[in-house]
Amino acid sequence: MRLSIANVLTPEECAEIRAKLARADFVDGKTTAGWHARLVKENEQARHHDPEARRVLDLARRRLLDHPVFVAAARPKAFAGLLLSRYRPGMHYGRHVDDAIMGGVRTDLSFTLFLCEPDSYEGGALVIEDAEGESEVRLPAGSLYLYPSTTLHRVDPVTRGERLAVVGWVRSFVRDPLAREILFDLETVRRLEFERHGKSDVFDLVSKSLANLLRCWAED
């Protein structure tokens, strides 16, 4: 399942983050790429110990874990990593697949949290490949795109402006992508039922099924 999630960060938070990152220390993005990805990675990322970058990543982590749609879709057990990427004109990240294990953690899902408005730069689309072809993603600042780490993907060259994003990887409590999608659909139905009818008999039965399926499928 692939999913766009709006309003992970507010416009004000994104503006503040961009100001902070103007003072941050960025290095060659190849430093965290696998041996094959280094051949096609041409971008920059904030130095891990940079204080401004750490504050931004801590905020992003909190907002993600507080966002009900992200939590329902990803069922996050752990973040395999979070980093801040920057693309300036001419920079890109060629076709690749994310490493299956990062820092000893399995990667089930990948995400890009966009920090710049799409009209502030040209190019830089996240392109996801699947059996039906290619999908280009350029979302508003504060929005996130979540997708399986199993996919081939790339970031097209930026031709104007600057593309900033938080990128990361998630190990899910629910390893099976079909099971995650079923749980996400049930959570969506449960919330819709509650909004319309409150804590009804239907809400209770869906909640029971959701909880019991999660017991069957979760890896704690």
Image: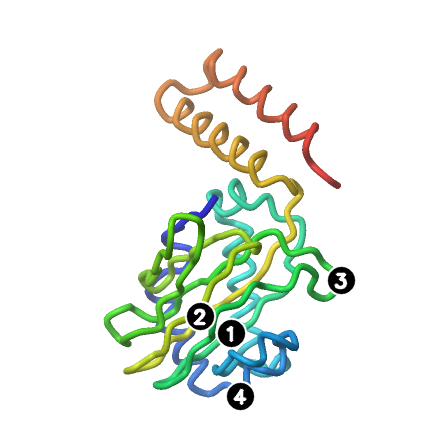
CA distance separating discs 3 and 2: 24 Å
Instruction: Give the Cα distance between marks 1 and 3.
Output: 20 Å
Name the residue at 52% across, 86% down: 26
**Front disc: 4 or 3:** 3
Q: Which residue is mark 2?
A: 165
Q: Quadrant of the C terminus?
A: top right
Callout in the foreground (1, 3): 3
- For marks 2 and 1, give the CA distance: 6 Å
Question: Is label 1 in a helix, a strand or a loop?
Answer: strand
Query: CB under 8 Å between callouts 3 and 2?
Result: no
209 shown above or below 146: above
Mark 1 and mark 4 residues within 8 Å of each other at the beta carbon: no
Location of mark 1 (residue): 84
Where is mark 4, residue-wise?
A: 25
Q: Secondary structure at mark 2?
A: strand
**Which mark, residue 104?**
3
